Image (spheres, grey):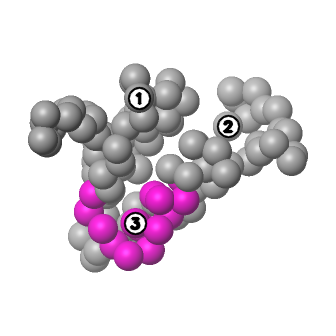
Amino acid sequence: MNFLSNRLTSIRNAKATQLSQIVFIRPQGSVPKAIFTILTLLRKNGIIRGFGFKEITLSGKIKREYIIYLKYDATGKSVLDSIFLVSKPSRRVYLSSAAL
């Protein structure tokens, strides 16, 4: 599994257990552009409440994290119905931006 599919699986699992937030340890360097773009689109379309980044110093080491805040309606049901990868290494799918 690649980095993006791992993150999407974590979001699906958090939704299933009704967690309010998910914390990921950032990889070395910055957050991959694909993850940042997807999180921005999810926030813009009202599917997640938001996301943020923070750095914590533990035992002299800097721990970089990013947090995704999931969104639920008034009845406690997740706003997110499903999230999955359409294109993957075993099956490439190319779509125009209008088709999304």
Residue lying at the far front in this picture: please name it.
59
Q: Few, some or many C-alpha atoms within 10 Å of disc 1 (few <14, some 14-19, many ≥20)?
A: few
Disc 3 is placed on an element classified as: helix
Point out the tag, 3 or 1, that comes first from the N-terminus. 3
Residue 14 at x, y percent in the picture? 40, 66
What is the crowding at mark 3: few (fewer than 14 residues within 10 Å), some, or many (at least 20)? some
The residues bearing labels 3 and 2 have C-alpha atoms spaced at a distance of 24 Å
Taking 48 as reference, is 27 above or below it?
above
**Is residue 60 in the magenta section?**
no
State the image quarter where residue 22 is shown: bottom left
Type of the residue with mark 3:
Ala
Position in image of residue 54 (x %, y %): 20, 34
Residues at discs 3 and 2 in contact (Cβ within 8 Å): no
Farthest residue toward the right?
91
- Find numbered disc 2 in the image and state the secondary structure of the residue it sits on: loop
Of the image marks 3 and 2, the number of the one nearer the N terminus: 3
Q: Which mark is residue 14?
A: 3
Position of 74 compared to 83: left or right?
A: left
Q: To which residue does mark 2 refer?
A: 100
**Residue at 20% over, 34% down:** 61
Residue with the mark numbered 1: 28
Task: Give, as a three-letter code, the residue at label 2.
Answer: Leu
**Secondary structure type for disc 1:** loop
**The C terminus appears in which quarter of the rendering?**
top right
